[in-house]
Amino acid sequence: MDKMLYAALLFDFYGGLLTEKQRRAFEMHIENDFSLAEIADELKISRQGALDLLKRSGETMNKYEGILRLIEKNRERNILCDEIKKIIGAIMNEADGENRLINDLRAVTEKLDYMSEV
């Protein structure tokens, strides 16, 4: 997985567990593509301080992921949802799309998709 994408996922799942200063720095870096100098200026710290802050933030979130595995579980859930959709599609093709229970199941998988996006 791309390093920046993984950092963004870490922040999405675990950013709320960071200190306010760590959260602001990481958000500036990941979401706004700020340089170390821009982060340092905004937070009134040195460039080295900004680098250390980002590094500690990443380490903290990686530690949480190592324990909780929320990103990994989310990825696995998405794979299973995709498999369910393929099976539903195959059943719908055989049943001419008229099965109410299959339509209900499709609605549930769509809700799961929405939940994993949020």
Image: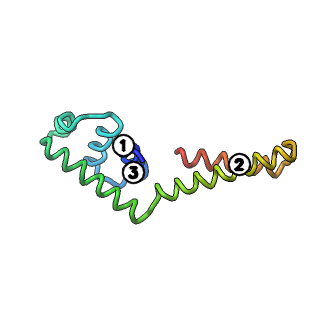
Which residue appears at 30% of the width and 58% of the height?
Answer: 60
Q: Which comes before the other along the chain, label 2 or label 3?
A: 3
SS type, badge 2: helix
Residue drawn at x 39%, y 53% as measured from the top left? 14
Q: Quadrant of residue 117?
A: top right
Q: x%, y% of residue 72?
A: 48, 57
Q: Nearer the viewer, residue 74 or 82?
A: 82
The residue carrying pointer 2 sits among few (fewer than 14), some (14 to 19) or many (20 or more) residues within 10 Å by Cα, namely few
Dot 1 falls on a residue whose secondary structure is helix
- What amino acid type should be assigned to the residue bearing mark 2? Lys
What residue did someone put label 2 on?
Answer: 86
CA distance separating discs 2 and 3: 29 Å
Question: Which tag, 1 or 3, sits closer to the chain's start?
Answer: 1
The location of residue 8, given as percent across then percent down, is: 39, 44
Q: Look at mark 1 in the image and give the residue it sits on.
A: 4
Q: Mark on residue 16?
A: none
Q: Nearer the viewer, residue 40 or 55?
A: 55
